[in-house]
Amino acid sequence: MVDLLLGLQWGDEGKGKIVDVLTKDYDIIARFQGGPNAGHTLEFDGIKHVLHTIPSGIFHKNAINIVGNGVVIDPVIFKKELDNLSQFDIDIASKLFISRKAHLILPTHRLLDAASEAAKGKAKIGSTLKGIGPTYMDKTGRNGMRVGDLEFDTWKEKYRALANKHEGMIDYYNVDIQYDLKELEEEFCEGIETLKKLTFIDSEQYMFDAMAEGKKILAEGAQGSLLDIDFGTYPYVTSSNTTAAGACTGLGVAPGKIGRVLGIFKAYTTRVGSGPFPTELFDEDGATMGRVGNEFGATTGRPRRCGWLDLVALKYAVQINGVTELMMMKADVLSGFDTIKVCTAYQYGGEEIDHLPYNIEDGNVSPVYTELHGWSQDLTKMTDAKDLPDTLNSYISFLEKELNVPIKIVSVGPDRKQTILR
């Protein structure tokens, strides 16, 4: 069986930390979608480390880490990521495998991303400009380059044909994009040579064999459920399926082989980039969440928009993923609020609804809040569930009742040790 670990909001929920905490119980950690626009932050032994493509189990010697076929890989960023890991005693060759069916992000994908976003003007979606969208477009358009192509002598010809196509598309957008493709290609080829030193696998067969041997597998996603290409707040979404279904297609795992579905959410809500956000705060409460929670993108450094917990959206994410247990992150950030609000319904079209409608753009919905008592205690030193304040336990119980799913972990800080099991 394969357990899934998913983000239930607009990303940045703290998936990397939880994978790191749970890895000791698993033999294989497999990433099933997304690209290097995702940043999973891990903290341990006084070290803060950000991973972009490599699975979050890489720091545990017992685990094999797999980059699945649903992932898109930028060889340049991947090389930098490996270089950053060189300071640790990690046997990369035996602990990190890459699916041959994973697609490659070309330098021209990034340029195309920038040109497309610039052409949108005020209607831009807030792309991280990492080339993710154009790469997935080539994948579904059946033009893409895959990791397995690197095992053949013709890969440079395939690259050239695709890059030429991209340059024509960039010209079509007619925007001012300055670039030196030769320089970008040199860096890209260096990344390719590094990538070719790793072990490429037919990951779906590897997973099938591992399950047959009784191996314990944890699949991790990137971004969050509300950024899913089908079920997120389209078009302000990512270009892949971030929900549970994405693990099946992103790793080649049959639906009947999915076991536990672990859903991660923050005690409040954040969002990076453009897109609707019904509970967003523009007051001192929102500023406090951002400041105390250090709400800046791990990859981009962009400040995250902050707001109260949106239970309507969270319930929706729990339903479409089939979540079996929940993990609440950053409970410590809400310490000091006398009153905590939770959005339990929307005003939509003149009526009150408790489900996520087709369009939650500004002006279409307004949040309906339930107010709860806050807590003032510093949670960051707590290590046992019995130490948690009564008002926090009431908050947790309220959420469990509304979501009908147990909250098994409460995170009270960024370090792996600041994790309370319930």
Image (tube, helix red, strand yellow):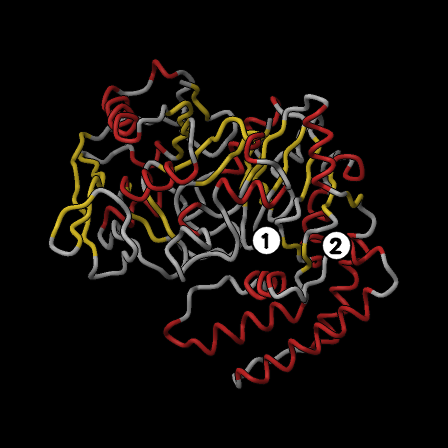
Quadrant hosting residue 399: top left
Residue 235: x, y in percent? 40, 62
- What amino acid is found at the position of numbered circle 1 in the picture? Gly
**Residue nearer the viewer, 343 or 417:** 343
| Front residue (pair 16, 5) | 5
Q: Position of residue 104 (x, y in %)?
A: 69, 59
Disc nearer the start of the sequence (1/2): 1
Q: Which quadrant of the rendered structure holds the C terminus?
A: top left
Marker count (numbered)? 2
Residue 117 position in % (x across, y down): 48, 72
Q: Is residue 84 left or right of residue 323?
A: right
Residue at x 39% of width, y 37% of height: 265
Q: Is residue 200 left or right of residue 375?
A: right
Residue 35: assigned label: 1
Who is closer to the viewer here, 161 or 42? 161
**Residue 27 vertical placement versus 309 (above, below):** above
Report the mark closest to the observer, 1 or 2: 2
The answer to whether 111 appears left or right of 233 in the picture is right
Mark 2 sits on what residue? 147
Does the residue at mark 1 contact the one at mark 2 (Cβ under 8 Å)? no
Q: Residue at x 29, y 32 (%)?
A: 335
Report helix, strand or loop for mark 1: loop
Vertical comparison of 332 with 249: above or below: above
Numbered label attached to residue 60? none
Quarter occupied by residue 22: top right
